[in-house]
Image (cartoon, grey):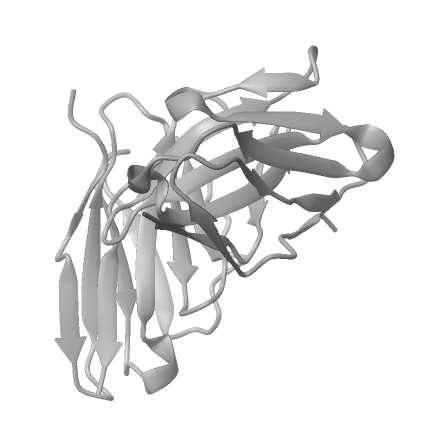
Amino acid sequence: AQSVTQPDIHITVSEGASLELRCNYSYGATPYLFWYVQSPGQGLQLLLKYFSGDTLVQGIKGFEAEFKRSQSSFNLRKPSVHWSDAAEYFCAVGARGDYKLSFGAGTTVTVRA
Amino acid sequence: GAGVSQSPSNKVTEKGKDVELRCDPISGHTALYWYRQSLGQGLEFLIYFQGNSAPDKSGLPSDRFSAERTGGSVSTLTIQRTQQEDSAVYLCASSFKDEQFFGPGTRLTVL
């Protein structure tokens, strides 16, 4: 069965500092990997996705993620955070033709001035 | 264009009452999903509809939960005899291919 672990429940970062959110997955085949962001009272918005090809994926809002098969990881990064990046971030894993996504428990990001 | 919409945005009910949650997917999306998001938890898959195929109900936590999708579009999630542990945010998503688009959710509080 597929599963996702987000080791950090809560991260606080200063505005302008870099951010890295960790995601480890367990999946027997080649995974499809996703990062979603959820602002308070909002639904989930897709930041980026990895299906195949280049292991460094660029997304919206200046985010990027790197797929590392050897480490079963798909960490999300942003070089310089903005106050508007304060939100909850979810990593998810699925597979082609398998509509069920497994989500991690999420990481809450707080941005301090 | 319009995204996935859900109603109501908030629902407070008393234990033992039935509730209905509605989801309007993006036009043309053939797949529709329901998830439950409990406090401090990730998203829990509940049910999946794809076109005219039989839905995948494997994630429904009990027989008090049911869902239907009429005309391949609007979906209703029904929870009968609500319990306090049903309190959560219920999210709906729709997709055409591999990307799921989420609605804002319905926050259900069972008193």
Position of residue A38 measured from the top left corner of the image (x, y, whole percent): 35, 46
The residue sitting at 67% across, 26% down in the picture is A66
Position of residue B104 measured from the top left corner of the image (x, y, whole percent): 24, 47
Among all residues in the image, which is located at the extreme top? A53
Residue toward you, B94 or A85: A85
Quadrant in the rendering for residue B109? bottom left
Residue toward you, A64 or B111: A64
Q: Quadrant of the N terminus of chain B?
A: top left
* Relative to B105, residue B38 above or below: below
Quadrant in the rendering for residue B20? bottom left
The residue sitting at 50% across, 58% down in the picture is B42
Q: Quadrant of the C terminus of chain B?
A: bottom left
Q: Can residue A112 be spotted in the picture? A: yes
The residue sitting at 12% across, 57% down in the picture is B8
Q: Is residue B103 left or right of residue A91?
A: left
Position of residue B29 measured from the top left corner of the image (x, y, whole percent): 32, 25
Q: Is residue A51 left or right of residue B88?
A: right
The residue sitting at 23% across, 64% down in the picture is B107
Position of residue B71 measured from the top left corner of the image (x, y, whole percent): 23, 35
Residue toward you, A101 or B20: A101
